[in-house]
Amino acid sequence: MSQKPINIAIIGLGFGAEFIPIYQKHPLANMYAVCQRNKEKAEEIGKAFGIEKVYTDYDELLKDPNIDAVHINTPIQNHAEQSIKALKAGKHVACTVPMATTVDECRQIVELCEETGLTYMMMETVIYSREFLFVKEMYEKGELGKIQFLRASHQQEMAGWPGYWEGLPPMHYATHCVGPVLALPKGQAEYVSCLGSGRIDENLIPKYGSPFAIETCHIKLKDSDLAAEVTRSLFNTARQYRESFDVYGSKKSFEWTLIEHEDSVIHTGEVPEKVKIPDYAHLLPEGIQKFTTQGVYDSDENQHLSFTQGSGHGGSHPHLVDEFLNALTEGRAPYPDARQSANITCVGILAHESAMDGGKIKYLPEFTLSK
């Protein structure tokens, strides 16, 4: 694309409103339009942020020829359909996680990107969090040595969330723990094996037919001697909210803190040392650096569960926006692109299938692997 500002439309204004001021202050973007089904809320947010183009109908928004890209922040069951519609309408897509809820939906998005040449990026927060950027920097400097194993977990209690979450299979929302174990070694999942454990409340089971309180999955990385393990829980499991990953290297290892807001640990050989994770705002354009530590949802009257439970998502939001906009401007693939996003997402989908099948190995489809 040319150097003219990229016209962005944000779809979904609950969690999605968090991104409005980031796009407004990014030098490569023009925060052009917002879309929300509730007309009153859509107009209220449009007015609050000075956005003139306010839509309540997504299909109408896609007809607007001035929109270059959409950023989708709607409920997970809408992600694939809305991404597919946007790509067919000639729009680039940034979409919150997960990419889709079925393998076939992931395939359609990948194929559309390759047919149209349009860009798709799944906005996976953990791989742009300050914790991940810290470990990535260590790895790229050679401080970890050879990576030997990776582990990640995402545990939360989703009681009180909107009804469509109730009884969701844990691995259907696994990208926050799958993402970092694939992104750090720049790897791809080849196959998975997953076991379910425990049982959620009986009234939660029928919606998705998933009984498990916890699902834990082993991932074999393609063309690598590496394996990873990820754990996910959503209901009926006592644990403080935790998005975490651990990396075990030949020289140093990194272990995420067990208790939120306490220090993580680096092991050098057998010697442990607590470490304070620095912020990485310096990697960003000056106008959006502040958004690694503050956002729309900082005020008491304006809290969003996804942001507060996720501890601000590790300062990732401006890094995600910066990666998407730079990829469009430079004419390159973002990370994760459509195939990589499909690989990350399909790990979770196939892991749940494996759990329901007693741990049977499930291979990732060819379209999720880089050419």
Image (tube, rainbow, N blue to C red):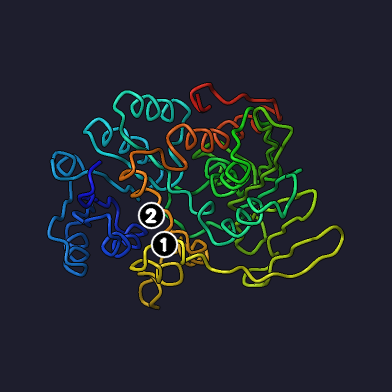
Picture quadrant of residue 182: top right
In the image, residue 248 above or below residue 207 = below
* Marks 1 and 2, how far apart at CA: 7 Å
- The residue located at (42%, 34%) in the rendering is 338
Q: Which residue is mark 1?
A: 284
The percent position of residue 311, horizontal first and vertical second, equals: 52, 66
Q: Is residue 78 left or right of residue 369?
A: left
Q: Secondary structure at mark 1?
A: loop
Task: Name the residue furthest bottom.
Answer: 300
Counting from the top left corner in percent of width and height, residue 299 is at 38, 77
Spot occupied by residue 62 in the image (x, y as percentages of width and height): 18, 40
How crowded pointer 1 is (Cα within 10 Å; few <14, some 14-19, many 20+) is rated as some
Callouts 1 and 2 close, C-beta under 8 Å? yes
First in residue order: circle 1 vs circle 2: 1
Q: Is residue 211 left or right of residue 358?
A: left
Is 327 or 305 nearer to us in this picture? 327
Q: Is residue 67 above or below residue 287?
A: above
| 302 relative to 328, above or below | below
Quadrant for the N terminus, please: top left
Local secondary structure at mark 2: helix
Which residue was labeled with disc 2?
Answer: 322
User: What residue do we see at 53% from left, 51% from top?
Assistant: 127
Image x and y of residue 140, in percent:
63, 50
Q: Amino acid at mark 1?
A: Leu
